[in-house]
Image (cartoon, rainbow, N blue to C red):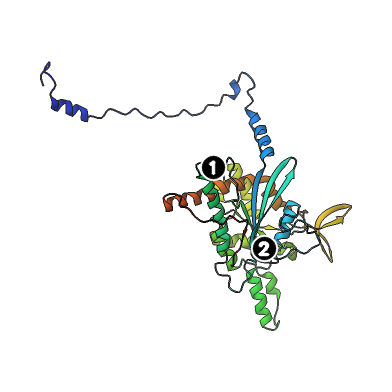
Amino acid sequence: MSKGLPETRTDAAMSELVPEPRPKPAVPMKPVSINSNLLGYIGIDTIIEQMRKKTMKTGFDFNIMVVGQSGLGKSTLVNTLFKSQVSRKASSWNREEKIPKTVEIKAIGHVIEEGGVKMKLTVIDTPGFGDQINNENCWEPIEKYINEQYEKFLKEEVNIARKKRIPDTRVHCCLYFISPTGHSVALEWWQWLSRGGQGSSDALTSLGPSLRPLDLEFMKHLSKVVNIIPVIAKADTMTLEEKSEFKQRVRKELEVNGIEFYPQKEFDEDLEDKTENDKIRQESMPFAVVGSDKEYQVNGKRVLGRKTPWGIIEVENLNHCEFALLRDFVIRTHLQDLKEVTHNIHYETYRAKRLNDNGGLPPVSVDTEESHDSNP
């Protein structure tokens, strides 16, 4: 086209087809530390005190579930853990009364206050898990209960006019109680008895105790939806050598079966976390514990313990059992992380799947009662 000639319609249309170059997205600058250049005190560090005051005013929720066959001292251990009668149905019961076997999934709430900090504690007791003749799929009502709590939270969260503080009934921690006898030892014991007690019984003590198939199945299913902490119940029934061997065998079986217990390796946030948690995973887990909510006089001090013909087993004495390690782990060092992993990992996994599968949030009937009956 010659210079000075008017632009034709075709040329104009072609020019319209040429897209304008898009501006390049701004790349955010990396934050630069200027601590050394501050001209004076700002007060950023007071956020910790602000958070502490807010927590002291509002308190916080912590929901713990106990699972295991009857007779392993689940209720007693929880009472010992929080040094109060938190697992009892009626607060009027005294220490001397025998704890009844649980027959239903039931959430019992308490408010515990220490140092001005209030904790709304909910203890979820479970059925006599694994006590039936046929225990097939007996973990299903427990898994159903856990998912129902996620559903309740999700429904509150998506409400247009939602509550300022959503009630949190999600299970933050599941203590899974392992029998100190082990499946292999129990099987060998019955085989020895079936022979009329003939032959040496030395093999009974040399066997490395193992988990029951039911233990493995339960943890395989539930470790995907809740933080599982395995504990060896009634550890005072084993010698130190037997306890050490038991712990090694359980860790090995969990590893072989691909079962991740809390704290999960994939959730370690940094090298410090990894170092601390590796020590717990490789040395402490599963915690070999003894529970008791009765006090005795030992060397002029009142201690929680179990009285035996050969003396008092002190629950909080690390030379006697690992209860103190479990208590410190659950309450003093990892309580907040248990809550965060529940919210950021387990709940988010449920939420994403729920919304993705349904393309929204259709109404779902959820049992809102505190107690949840089931027939495992």
Left/right of residue 24 with respect to residue 162 in the rendered view = left
Image quarter for residue 128? Answer: bottom right
| Residue assigned mark 2 | 245
Left/right of residue 259 with respect to residue 294 in the rendered view = left
| Residue assigned mark 1 | 162
Look at the picture and state if 82 lies above or below 312.
Answer: above
CA gap, disc 1 to disc 2? Answer: 52 Å
Closer-to-camera residue (168/335): 168
| Residue 235: mark | none
Task: State the image coordinates of residue 180 (x, y, percent, origin top left).
Answer: 69, 65
Image quarter for residue 333? Answer: top right
- Secondary structure of the residue carrying numbered label 1: loop
Please state which amino acid type lies under the numbered disc 1.
Arg
Please state which amino acid type lies under the numbered disc 2.
Glu
Q: Are marks 1 and 2 in contact (CB under 8 Å)?
A: no
Closer-to-camera residue (302/316): 302
One can see residue 215 in this view: yes
Q: From the viewer's perspective, is the residue at label 1 or at label 2 nearer?
A: 1
The first of marks 1 and 2 along the sequence is 1
